[in-house]
Image: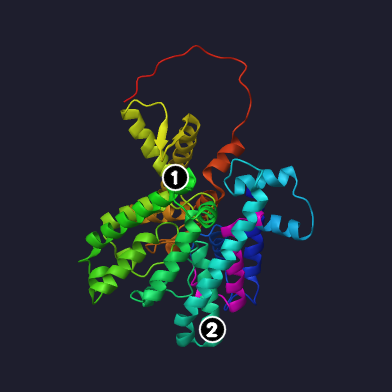
């Protein structure tokens, strides 16, 4: 049901983008479908320039699809039902639970309203601050629209921009380099974490999930910021082409945090060194947090995998962090999620490599970006044929709906009638 809801929304969005009022010079159905899928899955990969190929109405449709996909389609359904006074039944709660990646159904309605309040507040503040950058340059109404569109795109980690070079013209602008990352970091750490911070306002009182998410995000941001600067400082195509140290530090900061499924860029991604590209792909695969607008396998999944590895070498049967313990169920869940994710990425890359004889590194980058719903590109997306674009659409869809959701859909929950004696398998 959840997958069907997303499919219907994508098809409706593609139909709206095909209307003459939505585009400037006409658009092919395949391009409209790709753009709609990229918007609903908050990916940001494009095959046509969003700013020139679509009118303000079409851009508004894209922004609406981004908002729907980022906050969750079932979130909007619950808001509509609540506004009409219709009670939320158990089937709707079960679908909402999968859409929000939750394990319980008791507090889902409260969580939906927390998500709505956080989204409205963050996007309104983003529009207010970004208008000081866009209005002086583009005029009042056009500048306000630029601020609204990029605020929605940033908070929902979509990466859609109205300029062919994304945000490269503001590579050294402090406002853009602070506001845009702040919005997609807030949207990417998860609504549960933001709500927990708002309610508790004390590190000791935070839940284990919030502590793991915040500490893991801080470590990943700091590590990627330093590594990007070290790897690209002398590259004339990226940091080496900037004039002063301040601009290089701002660009390093932006490019270090944007692979966490944000998708904006202030430097030419295709000019990055291979080592930096590989690091970026790793960050795209990890993604952001659960119950967020971000994709990927999630930061907490990476942390639990590392904790499980350390526990294995220490001969421990349970995981410990911040005075709490995690059992085998959590380890099995993250192992299943990681396995499905890697198989999906590798399968997509294999299929695309059959029909495309181009640089395998560029194809791998596009596939990873699609799965992590990031939107960063090395220029290969626009050159893909029909099979390649169809593959990217499928990967974007699966990356947004969630590998575990697909796994739960395919799995049969039944109690085994037969138990077998224990066996032994030699590993390693």
| Disc 1 from disc 2: Cα separation | 40 Å
Q: Which residue is mark 1?
A: 300
Q: Please identify the quarter of the rendering in which residue 20 is found.
A: bottom right
Q: Position of residue 189 (x, y in %)?
A: 47, 54
Instruction: Give the mark nearer the N terminus: 1 vs 2.
Output: 2
- Look at the image and say whether residue 421 sits in the magenta stretch: no
400 sits to left or right of 316: right
Q: Quadrant of residue 427?
A: top left
Looking at this view, is 411 or 140 the one in front? Answer: 140
Mark 1 Cα-neighbour bin, 10 Å: few <14, some 14–19, many ≥20: many
Give, as a single range, the part of the protein colored magenta: 47-75
Q: Residue furthest left?
A: 234
* Quadrant for the C terminus in the image: top left
Which residue is painted at 49% across and 80% down in the image?
Answer: 131
The single residue placed furthest to the right in the displayed view is 85
Badge count: 2
Is 325 placed above or below 345 here?
Answer: above
- Residue 416 to residue 234: above or below: above
Residue 359 shows in this picture:
no
Tags 1 and 2 in contact by the CB under 8 Å rule? no
**Residue 421 position within the rendered picture, expressed as x and y whole percent measured from the top left:** 50, 11
* Number of residues whose C-alpha sits closer than 10 Å to that of mark 2, classed few (under 14), some (14–19) or many (20 or more): some
- Does the magenta-highlighted stretch encompass residue 54? yes
Q: Which residue is mark 2?
A: 142
50 sits to left or right of 93: left
Q: Position of residue 412 (x, y in %)?
A: 62, 30
- Mark 1 or mark 2, which is nearer to you? 1
Where is 291 relative to 318, above or below?
below
Asked whether the viewer can see residue 127, the reply is yes
Residue drawn at (47%, 65%) of the image:
183
Quarter of the image holding residue 114? Answer: bottom right
Image point (44%, 65%), residue name: 182
């Amino acid at each position: 049901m959840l997958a069907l809801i997303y499919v219907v929304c994508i098809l409706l969005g593609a139909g709206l983008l095909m209307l003459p009022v939505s585009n400037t010079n006409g658009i092919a159905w395949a391009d409209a479908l790709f753009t709609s899928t990229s918007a609903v899955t908050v990916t940001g990969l494009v095959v046509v320039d969003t700013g020139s190929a679509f009118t303000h109405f079409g851009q508004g449709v894209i922004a609406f699809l981004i908002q729907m996909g980022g906050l969750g389609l079932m979130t909007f359904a619950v808001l509509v039902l609540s506004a009409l006074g219709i009670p939320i039944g158990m089937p709707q709660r079960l679908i909402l639970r999968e859409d929000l990646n939750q394990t319980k159904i008791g507090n889902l309605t409260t969580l939906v309203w927390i998500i709505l309040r956080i989204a409205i507040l963050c996007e309104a503040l983003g529009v207010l601050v970004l208008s000081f950058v866009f209005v002086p340059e583009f005029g009042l109404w056009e500048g306000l629209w630029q601020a609204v569109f990029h605020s929605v795109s940033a908070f929902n980690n979509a990466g859609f921009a109205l300029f062919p070079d994304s945000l490269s013209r503001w590579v050294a602008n402090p406002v853009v380099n602070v506001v845009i990352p702040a919005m997609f970091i807030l949207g990417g750490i998860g609504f549960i974490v933001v709500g927990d911070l708002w309610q508790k306002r004390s590190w000791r009182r935070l839940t284990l999930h919030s502590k793991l998410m915040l500490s893991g995000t801080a470590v990943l941001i700091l590590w990627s910021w330093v590594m990007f600067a070290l790897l690209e400082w002398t590259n004339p195509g990226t940091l080496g082409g900037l004039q002063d140290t301040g601009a290089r530090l701002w660009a390093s900061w932006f490019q270090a945090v944007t692979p966490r499924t944000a998708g904006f860029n202030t430097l030419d991604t295709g000019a990055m060194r291979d080592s930096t590209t590989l690091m970026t792909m790793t960050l795209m695969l990890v993604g952001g947090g659960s119950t967020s607008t971000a994709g990927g396998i999630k930061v907490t999944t990476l942390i639990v995998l590392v904790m499980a590895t350390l526990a294995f070498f220490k001969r421990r049967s349970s995981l410990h962090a911040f005075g709490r313990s995690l059992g085998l169920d959590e380890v099995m869940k993250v192992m299943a999620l990681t396995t499905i994710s890697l198989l999906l990425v590798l399968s997509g890359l294999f299929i695309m490599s059959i029909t495309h004889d181009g640089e395998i590194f560029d194809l791998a980058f596009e596939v990873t970006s699609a799965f992590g719903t990031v939107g960063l590109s090395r220029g290969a997306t626009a050159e893909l044929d029909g099979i390649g674009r169809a593959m990217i659409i499928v990967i974007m869809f699966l990356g947004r709906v969630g590998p575990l959701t697909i796994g739960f859909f395919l799995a049969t929950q039944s109690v085994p009638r037969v138990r077998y004696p224990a066996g032994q398998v030699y590993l390693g």
